[in-house]
Amino acid sequence: MAEGERQPPPDSSEDTPPATQNFVIPKKEIHTVPDMGKWKRSQAYADYIGFILTLNEGVKGKKLTFEYKVSEAIEKLVALLNTLDRWIDETPPVDQPSRFGNKAYRTWYAKLDEEAENLVATVVPTHLAAAVPEVAVYLKESVGNSTRIDYGTGHEAAFAAFLCCLCKIGVLRVDDQIAIVFKVFNRYLEVMRKLQKTYRMEPAGSQGVWGLDDFQFLPFIWGSSQLIDHPYLEPRHFVDEKAVNENHKDYMFLECILFITEMKTGPFAEHSNQLWNISAVPSWSKVNQGLIRMYKAECLEKFPVIQHFKFGSLLPIHPVTSC
C-alpha cells in the first residue's frame, strides 16, 4: 500500500464547485454483499481513501503541538464540536436498569438531528448554502446510532467523509491539512470519547479482543504517521505506561492507548491483542503501512460497515471518472 500513500490530494480539495452543482441528500446504495464491488469502483471510495492518505502524508513526523495554520473554517468547526460537547453536559445520563446504552443519548442525538443543518451553516459560507443539507447528513451519521446507542468505525468514517465534503466544496483547503487532523479530528475524538463514557455506548460491530480498538481506527493510522522517524519512540514503547504518560499529549496514537488503558482492565496483551502484536513491528512506517492495509480490509471492505455509508453528489456512487 506504500505506493498509494503518495497519491495527490483529491482534485477537489481546492476547487469551489460551480454554482450549477446539484446537491442532493445522500442515501444508502450498498444493500447487498455483491454491491460492495460498486463501492470499491466508486468515485466516493477513490476520493475518501485519497483524502485519508493525503492527511496521513501531511501529519508525518509532526507532533500535535507543532505550529500550524488555523483558518477561520477550522475555528468554526472546533466551535461546532464544542457545541456538541456542551450538549453532553446539558444531557446527563438517566437512571436505568441496563448498565450500557444510556437512553439519555437519544435526547442528545435528537438535538443534533434537529440542529445539524444550522450547525453546518455556521461553517459554510452563504454562497454555498445549497450544500448544507447534503454535508449535514455526514455530521449526523458521525456520532453513533441512536436506536442501538452504539458507535464504531463506520461513524468515524462518516466524520472523515464530512470533512472530505467540506474540502470538495472549498470550505477547507490544502493548507488546512494539518489542522484538519490535529485540531478538528482530535477535538472530534475528545467529544466521541466523552459520549462513549457518559452514555456507556456499545461498540458497533466490534470484533472484541481481535479488533484493533472498540471504537476508532483513523487516529491509529494518522498517529502512527506522526511517529515515523521519531528519534527514540519505537512501536515497542507504546505498551510502556511511562512512555505513554510522558508523550500522549504530542501523539494521537499514544492518546488512543491511554484511553484504552483507562477504559479496560487486565493485561494489555489480553484486552488489546492486535495492538500488542503491532508493538512488535520494528518501525513506525511499517506500522503505518500495515494499518492502512488493515483499514481497507477490516473497515472499508466490510459490508456490515459500508452498508450504512451514504452517497450524494460530493461522494458519488458512480464509477471513477478518468479526467
Image: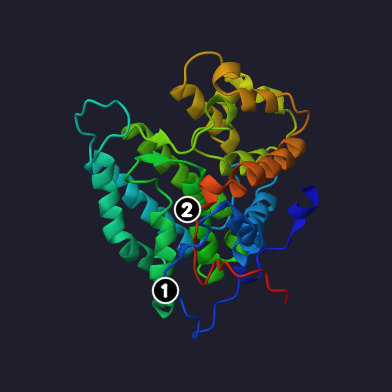
Residues at marks 2 and 1, CA–CA distance in whole angstroms? 29 Å
As drawn, the residue found furthest toward the bottom would be 20
Disc marking residue 308: 2
Which residue sits at x=73%, y=28%? 232
> 88 or 114, which lies in front?
114
Is residue 251 visible to the viewer in this orientation of the structure? no
- Quarter of the figure that contains the C terminus: bottom right
Asked if 308 appears above or below 255 in the picture, the reply is below
Please, what secondary structure does the residue beneath circle 1 have?
loop
As drawn, the residue found furthest toward the top would be 266
**Sequence-wise first label, 2 or 1:** 1
Is residue 322 visible to the viewer in this orientation of the structure? yes
Which residue sits at x=58%, y=51%? 33
Q: Position of residue 288 (x, y in %)?
A: 71, 40
Among the 4 quarters of the image, the one containing residue 62: top right
As drawn, the residue found furthest toward the right would be 3
Q: Position of residue 6 (x, y in %)?
A: 76, 56
Asked if 40 appears above or below 186 in the picture, the reply is below
Q: Which residue is mark 1?
A: 125
> 314 or 222, which lies in front?
314
The nearer-to-camera label among 2 and 1 is 2
Residue type, numbered disc 2: His
Which residue sits at x=40%, y=70%? 132
Neighbor class of circle 2 (other Cα within 10 Å; few <14, some 14-19, many 20+) is: some
Q: Position of residue 214 (x, y in %)?
A: 50, 33
Neighbor class of circle 1 (other Cα within 10 Å; few <14, some 14-19, many 20+) is: some
Please, what secondary structure does the residue beneath circle 2 have?
loop
Q: Position of residue 210 (x, y in %)?
A: 59, 27
> 74 or 323, which lies in front?
323
